[in-house]
Image: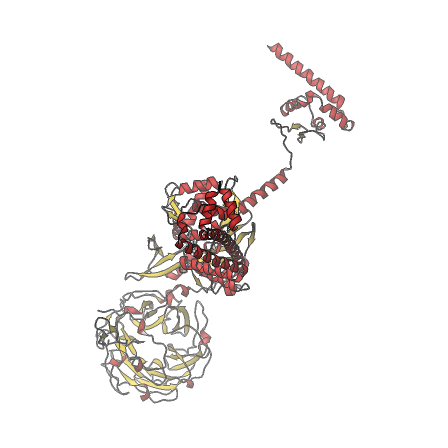
Amino acid sequence: MADDNNRNDDDLGNETDDLNQNDDLDLNDADDVDEEDLDEYESDDEDDDFDSDEEDEDEDYGFEADDNAKLAGAGLDHTISDEAGTRLDLTDIHGGALKPTDLSSEMKASFLEYSMSVIVARALPDVRDGLKPVHRRILYAMNEAHIVPTRPHKKSAWTVGEVMGKYHPHGDAAIYDSMVRMAQDFSMRLPLVDGHGNFGSIDGDPPAAMRYTESRLTHAAMAMLQDLDKETVDLQPNYDESLQEPAVLPSRFPNLLVNGSAGIAVGMATNVPPHNLKEVTDAVCMMIDNPDVTIDELMTVLPGPDFPTGGVIMGTSGIKEAYETGRGTITIRSKVHVENIGKGGRQRLVVTEIPYAVNKGTLQERIAQQVNEKHIEGISDLRDESNSKGMRIVIDLKSGAVPQVVLNNLYKRTQLQSNFGVIDIALVDGVPRTLSLREMLRYYIDHQVDVVTRRTKFDLDKALKRVHILEGLLIAVDNIDEIVHIIRSSRDDAEAKARMNDRFGIDDIQGEAILQMRLRRLTGLARDELVAQIKDLHDRIDYYRDLLEHPNKLLGVIKDELRQISDRFSNKRRTSISEHSVENLDVEDLIAEEDMVVTFTHAGYVKRVPLATYRAQKRGGKGIQGLSLKDNDFVEDLFVASTHDYVMFFTNKGRVYRVKVHELPLGSRHARGSALVNVVPLSEREHPTAVVFTREFPADEYLLFATRNGMVKKTAMSDYDKSRRDGIIAINLKPGDELVNVHRVKPGQKVIMCSDEGKAILFDESEVRPTGRDTSGVRGITLKDGVRMLGMEITNGQGDLLVMTEKGYGKRTPVAEYPEHKRGGMGVATIVMTEKKGNLVACRVVGPQHELMVVTEEGVVIRVKATDISRLGRATQGVKIMNIADSDRVGAVARMVAHKKKAAKADPAQGSLAIPVTNSNDFDEEDSIDIGSDDDFDESALDEDEE
C-alpha cells in the first residue's frame, strides 16, 4: 500500500510538472498572450474543470500569483476572477447566471430602498389622516369585520390575525402594540380603540397578551372612517394584490393634530404633540374663513398642545416656534401642590399630573435614587396613592424643609419637568416634509374638500340613478294596463323591455326595475309615494349640483360637520399654559397666595402661620396659647403679609435683608419657629427691629426711618430694590443709636413719634427731606436722658392713636386732638403714666374697622376689636385691655382689619329673611375710616376657630 501511495504521489508530481511545462510554454509572458490565444486556451476542457479547491492545491505545488494573474483575462463568459486571478464560474445550476455588481453600489441601493420603505410605509404618518399604515390598516380591518361600538368586543388576537393576514405582512407584536397605543387614554387625546382588559398603564406595566384582551372601535374612530363606502378616498392593492385597502382614511376630524404622532424613520423622526379637539376645530374654521390667517391669530383659539396626562406648559415661545417652523421645544412641568401634615408643621408635596410620555413608575424610582444618593435633601417618604379617581404621588418632607426648594430640585433632577421636542414631519403626497401649523391645517382642509367633493359626486350619481328608475316606475304605474299586456304578450324579458322602450321610451335599466316591481306598487298610495320620492330626489340633486358649483358652500359643509364632531367628542383642556418660561419662572409661581401671620421673638426665632389659626375674643378675654417659648424669650414683633410679598428685615444695626414671605419657615400655632439666623445672615448682636412687606418698589414712595435716639430719615423705596446675601445698608447710624421703626410714607401724611415716658409728637412728613440710603437723617423728637423713642406711626389725620402699657392698660385718643408741631420737639402727653400700668410699650393708629392682636412675652395671644377699647382724652389713664399675669408683660401689638358685616341671607324654608346675628368681630363697611396706613391686613380670609 505504501508503494501505491508513492506511485500516486509520483503521478501527481508528473502531472504537475507537465502542467508547469505547459504554463511555461503557453503563458511565458503576459505580452505574448493575445485574445485568440486566450480563447483557445479557454476552450480546453481540462482548464474549464479547474475550481478553487484544485487551485489551492496547485499553489502548494509551485503556482505563483503572477502566473495565476495571467489566467484572469477579459471576455470570459459567465466567469469572473478574484484578486488572485482565480476564475469563478457564475453559471447557476438552474440555468441562470449570477450578475456581478459593485458592493458599495448595492449597499447604497438597498439602503435607499429600505429607507424609503420605512419612511413611507411604516414610521411616518400621512398629513391628511395623521395615521401610519399599521394604524390605518387596524381601523380599516376592524371596520370591515364590523367590530364597531354598537357590537360586543372581540378578541384582540383575532383582530391582529385579520390585519396581519390581509393587510400588514409584519410581526403580530408590532400590530398589537399599535392597537394597544390607540386604546390608551394616557397616550391618545382621543382614543380610537375601545380596549377591554389590561392595555397597560402609565406606570409602565405592559399590556396583557392579545389572547386575553378584547377590543372594538370607538365612536371617534367611526368618525375617521365615515363615508369610506362612498368612494371618498382612493383604494390600493394590499401586499399580495388579493384585496383592496384605503390609501388614506376620510378622517372627518384633524387626527394628526388631535392625537399627535411619534415615529423614528431612517435619517428622520416625527414627534407631533396632541391638541384639544375643540381648539383644533376652531383653528380649522378660522383658516377656512381666512386662508391668510397668521400664527398669532391661530394661537388665540389654539394656544398650544393639550396632553392627555395634563401638566403645565412653561412659556409660549417654544409653542410659537413649533407652529411657525415645525420644530421647537416645549417644557412641561408636573402639577404639584403643598399640603400640611397634622399639627407638627410638616408638609408634603402632592403630584397630581405628570408630563406627557413620562413613566410614573420610573419617575418614582428616579426620585428615590436621587434621595438615596443625597442629591435631593428634605424628603422623608415617597408613596403612590393613585387610584381610579386620579393620580396622587405623595412626597413627605422633613421638618423644616422648604417645599419650594425641594420642588425646584425635583424639577431639575427628575422627570417632574421634561422637554417635548416638537418635530412636525408628515408625508405629503408620499414625501416627508416638515410642516408648520398653517401647512398642516391647509393640507387637512384640502383633504376634506376632496373627501366632501367625492362624496357629493357619489351621492349625486346615486340620486340620478335612483330618480331615473323611479321615473320609469311612475310611467309604468300610470300605464299599468298596457305595461301588463306588453309583459304578458312577450316571449321573454328582452322582448318585453324592447317593446316598452318602443312604446314609452323606457330603457333597459328602467325596464328591469319594472319587471321586478311588486303588485303592491300599483296602489294609489304607492304612486303618491313615488311622486314624493322623485320630488325629494330632484331637490337633493339640485343641492348636490349647487354644492359642487360653489366651493364656499362646500367649505361651509366641512365647517358644520366638523363642529358637530367637536361638540360630540371634545372635552375641557387638560394641560394649562403658563406665561412664564422656565428661565423666568419665580418660585412664588408654585405657591398659593395666602395671608400669613409672621412672628419674631426676642431670642431670634421666626415663623409664619396661616392667619386662620387665630380667632377673635371680646375685650378682657384670657386669649389662647399662641407660642411655646423658651425661658427668658418673648415675642417682639408680629405682622401679617401675603406669601408673595417681599419681606424687608431692618435690623438694629441699620442694615436691611430682603426675602419672600414663603421663604420663611412654616410653623404651627404652638411652635416657636426657626432661628432667624437660618433665614438671613445676621451678625453678632444683630436682630430685626422693623419689618416692611411690599410687592413693588416705586420711586414716588418713601420709607421713613426712626431711631432709638429720635432721629428720622426719608428715602425712596426704589433705593432698596436690590438684594445681597449679607444685606445692604439701610441707614447710617450714629454711635450708640439703633434703628427702631420703618414705615412707608406718602406725601401729605402725618408722622407720630412716641416715647416710653408717654410723650408723643405729630408733624408733617414733608418736614423730613428725602436723602440717600447711606445717610443718618435728622432729629424727629427730642428726648430726655434715659428716655427712649418707643415707636413711630403714619397717619392722614383721621382715626385714633391707641397706646398700650406693658401691664395691659391702654386707650384710644382721636389723632385730631394731637397738635401738629415742627419736627424736633419734645411732644405732648398721650397717657398718664403710673407705676401700676408700667411704661408705654406700643402705639398704633386705628379705626373702627380694626382689631388688635396682642402678644405677651410669655406667648399669650389675644385679639380684641378696636371699638371695644375706650375712647378717652389725650391726657387720661386708660382702661384695662388684657389681663396680664404678674410675671408677664405686653410684648407686641399688631393691627388688622376685622370681618365686614355680611348681609342677611334668605331662608328658603321660611320664605323670608333670617334674623341677622352680629358677630363681635363684624363691622359695617360704611363705618370704616381710612387712617392713611397700608401696613395692616384684611381679615376677610380669616377662618374662625370656634372654641
The total of numbered circles placed on residues is 0
Looking at the image, residue 746 sits to the left or right of residue 612; the answer is right
Q: Relative to residue 131, is residue 280 depicted above or below?
A: below
Find residue 684 and report its image quarter.
Answer: bottom left
Q: In this view, does 459 lie above or below 10?
A: below
Picture quadrant where residue 311 is located: bottom left
Is 920 positioned to the left or the right of 153 in the image?
A: left
Examine the rendered structure and indicate whether residue 111 appears above or below residue 837: above
Q: Can residue 404 be seen in this view?
A: yes
Image coordinates of residue 727 in percent, x first then y, are 43, 70
Nearest to the observer: residue 506 or residue 14: 506
The colour scheme used to paint the residues is secondary structure
- Give the image location of residue 341, x and y in percent: 30, 60
Residue 686: image location, x then y, percent? 38, 71
Res 322 seen here: no
Q: Is residue 165 above or below residue 753?
A: above
- Identify which residue, 228 or 707, lies in the foreground: 228
Image x and y of residue 627, in percent: 27, 68
Image quadrant containing the N terminus? top right
User: Residue 614, located in which quarter of the rendered image?
Assistant: bottom left
Residue furthest to the right in view is: 32
User: Which residue is pictured at 32% across the width and 84% down the height?
Assistant: 799
Report the quarter where the C terminus lies.
bottom left
Q: Which of 616/501 is in front?
A: 501
For this view, does 893 lie left or right of residue 588?
left
Question: Who's the residue at 58% across and 43% down the image?
Answer: 113
